[in-house]
Amino acid sequence: MKAQSRGPRGAATLEEVASRAGVSRATASRVLRGQSNVSEAAYQAVHRAAAEVNYSPNRAARSLVTGRSDSVAFLVNETEERMFSEPFFLAVLRSAQETVTAAGLQLNFAIASTPAQRDRFFSYATGGHVDGVLLLSVHDNDEFQRHLEQAGIPTVLSGRPYGDGDLFYVDADNVAGSRMAVSHLLEVGRRTLGVIAGPLDMCAGQDRLRGYREALEEAGVGVDETLVEEAGFSLLEGYDATCRLLDRRPDLDAIVAASDLAAIGAIRALAQRGRRVPEDVAVVGFDDIREAAEYDPPLTTVRQPMADLGATMAQVLLGRLDGRESDARGVVLPVELVVRASA
């Protein structure tokens, strides 16, 4: 049998993989690029052959032919402190990584919380280093995602965008989640419901506050603005917001928090003020992070599908890169209420 030629420095070539697998070079290429239009037998044979010869795709050479980098950016528009302290981001990152890797692409992680960092990332992205962007944490009317799209970089957002609906995004049903939390508290007899709204420069914060207002109004309770406190999603921000609420409304008997970390901060503030949870004040969070079930008392919360968010964002982006662009620009995933001891 004729020896197969080797690439630079003795590296296995695509031709060698194809020959060993008994398929054409084109079929081997489709399999290794993660395309689905191949038989199961060919798929298994190519991957087995690639493993046997320790084949590694030459991305640089392929990018010259296809004009693609085979890389996707996971960009977080937050500080490093928030990115690595809030479980939401890591859960979304993990599932996005799994989906992108399974498709044969590389996921590049980046943080851009300042204008200078965004400018550097924009130069990097438009320089041909990534084929698309998964963008998390959009604040205000930030046009950064639109600038990427206008530069030819397909982008998918985590969360509903501001303004018109021509951007691609994946979101959890934040309005329905807050409505579930309020309805549950009313059902168990609470009537003076404070809310720690998320940051109102983000659609997630706006939508969770909207759900709180709608549920109270539909129940005929009405919204008392002295029970509304805007804050961020962190534990400390939840603690501080609860202290402000108690100073204004010491009679409150429930708190709806825009995140689990904020809810845990609320429970700590209540304990320091001598309030028992849930006997004196019931508390409901949002997210269902691991700590929610482990906290004392275990936290009642709205579970949003963080893993599904990351995977779905990646699937939408991969579809766009392969020319399968949907007319529906937004995907909204369902949430559910998880009842535990805190409410």
Image (cartoon, grey):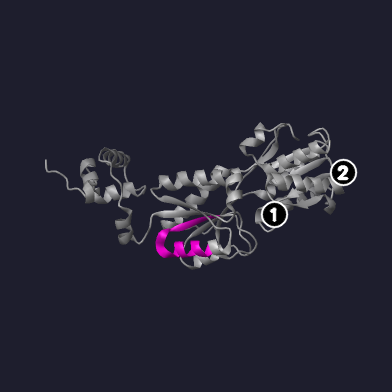
Query: What's the CA distance linking mark 1 and mark 2?
Result: 23 Å
The answer to whether any part of residue 72 appears in the image is yes
Residue 196 appears left or right of 125: right
Assign the C terminus to one quadrant of the image: top right
Disc 2 residue type (three-letter) = Pro
Residue 123 appears left or right of 165: left
Callout 2 secondary element: loop
The residue identified by callout 2 is 250
Residue 105: image location, x then y, percent: 40, 50
Q: Which residues are magenta?
A: 118-135
Instruction: Specify whether residue 119 is painted magenta.
Output: yes
Q: Is residue 130 above or below residue 252?
A: below
Q: Residue at x 28, y 47 (%)?
A: 28
Residue 134: image location, x then y, percent: 51, 54
Front in this rendered view, residue 247 or 279: 247
Instruction: Specify whether residue 218 is painted magenta.
Output: no
Q: Residue at x 30, y 46 (%)?
A: 56
Q: Residue at x 54, y 61 (%)?
A: 117
The residue identified by callout 1 is 199
Disc 1 residue type (three-letter) = Pro
Q: Quadrant of residue 162?
A: bottom right
Assign the N terminus to one quadrant of the image: top left
Callout 1 secondary element: loop
